[in-house]
Image (cartoon, helix red, strand yellow):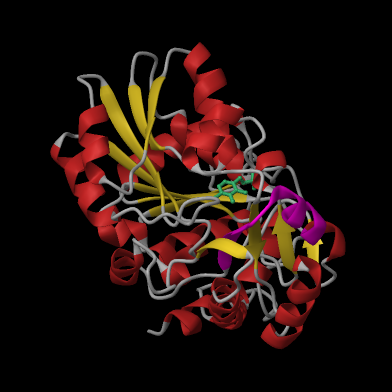
Amino acid sequence: MDKGTLLIHNGHDMDPLTGALGVTVYQTSTFYRKVITEMQEFDYSRGGNPTRKALEETIASLEGGAKGYAFASGMSAISSVLGLLAAGDHVVIAEDVYGGSRYILETFYRRWGLEMTAVDTSDPQNILKAIRPNTRALYLESPSNPLLKITDLSSCIAAAKERGLLSIVDNTFMTPYLQQPLKLGADIVVHSATKFLGGHCDVISGLAVTATEELGRQLYQIQNSFGAVPGPWDAWLVMRGIKTLKARMDMQQATAGKLAEWLAAREDITAVNYPLLPGHPGRDIHLAQASGGGAMLSFKTKTTEQALGFYKKVRLATAAPSLGGVETIASYPVKMSHINMPAAERERMGISDNLVRISVGLESAEDLTADFDQALR
Ligand SMILES: *Cc1c(COP(=O)(O)O)cnc(C)c1O
């Protein structure tokens, strides 16, 4: 079936009891125990809630996985997944993943005995060089944040599999509508559902999908024990957002493509990062593993002053962290998503003071370019 159809007919399009369209919000913490000696599916909402379950089954089917789990945020999904690893294990991580993911590995998980090496995964050789006898997992994100670098997911995952590593992919930027990492061999996909899946900047939520039932069982123990779960209203909001994902993503990425081309033609812009832009080094690989360019792009202005002036003058893009909403958002990676990264490391990677990251919304391309034009002057 077409992915757009599956977004609507996800198995939870109607409440079986009343015929209400969509899933019901089960705002309850606990459930009547019918037979006092017997465990039942819904017992206590940390362990399971029908609204959350609908979201979990929906994301599992969209990603083509065995089991899906919903969390209170993208970060709690990611930290719960990393909880599958043990002290003494080593993780190889893409160097320009979401700042928070790298931060928890470099601080808390390091303190608890998990080792990590960050490498540029756009060259798979770097992954092979970083693997040690105690390496247990490979953590990837493609396109990366905020530079939109492309990692060849299939070949990196295949190399990881050969060495018995768990492959984890953050699929937030693409969503399962455009890219399905489990089909490329990954073991676990994680999401910040706060972004394109929720789609309206009105909820913080996270998701994880496992390729196998067994990994799902292990992750469920973590979800239920640590309890970083979303409430039913948040799960419901993400479910509602998912229904319009195709419509939003199709329009947002079409506009992103136009905006990227328009920026690339300007002589006061020194770099534009968008996966489908001719000349993007990862373009062919991206097209082989995803069905669209997505709605994220970043660019560099000639000077830092010009970038700072852009945030001040731009009217149709909100200067804010986050992404994936219906409104265009201009974020400033050095002072937002990557603020915890040492400045020298940021500079080496190209996350510089003149880098602007754009999440393209549903405004018209013509209005956005006219507004960006006045803001860049
Ligand atoms: C926002 C984001 C996260 C973190 O998710 P939260 O919902 O903010 O906790 C993780 N990965 C990526 C790619 C993100 O954009």
Give the tally of numbered discs. 0
Q: Is residue 184 above or below residue 157?
A: below
Position of residue 157 measured from the top left corner of the image (x, y, whole percent): 25, 47
Quadrant of residue 268 within the rendered picture: bottom right
Which residue shows up at 46% across the image and 72% down it? 293
Q: Position of residue 219 (x, y in %)?
A: 44, 37
Name the residue at 16% across, 34% down: 163
Q: Position of residue 10 (x, y in %)?
A: 51, 74
Q: Which residues are magenta?
A: 296-310
Relative horizontal placement of residue 326, taking residue 1 as reference (left or right) = right
Query: Which residue occupies the extreme left position in the image?
Result: 162
In the image, residue 166 sits, relative to residue 371, either above or below, namely above
Residue ID at (33%, 49%): 122
The residue sitting at 56% across, 56% down in the picture is 53
Q: Quadrant of residue 139?
A: top left
Residue 272 shows up from this direction:
yes
Q: Nearer the viewer, residue 367 or 359?
A: 367
- Please determine whether, in this image, residue 376 is positioned above or below residue 112: below
Q: Quadrant of residue 261 in the image? A: bottom right
Residue 225, above or below 294: above
Question: 223 left or right of 133?
Answer: right
Is 98 inside the magenta-drawn segment?
no
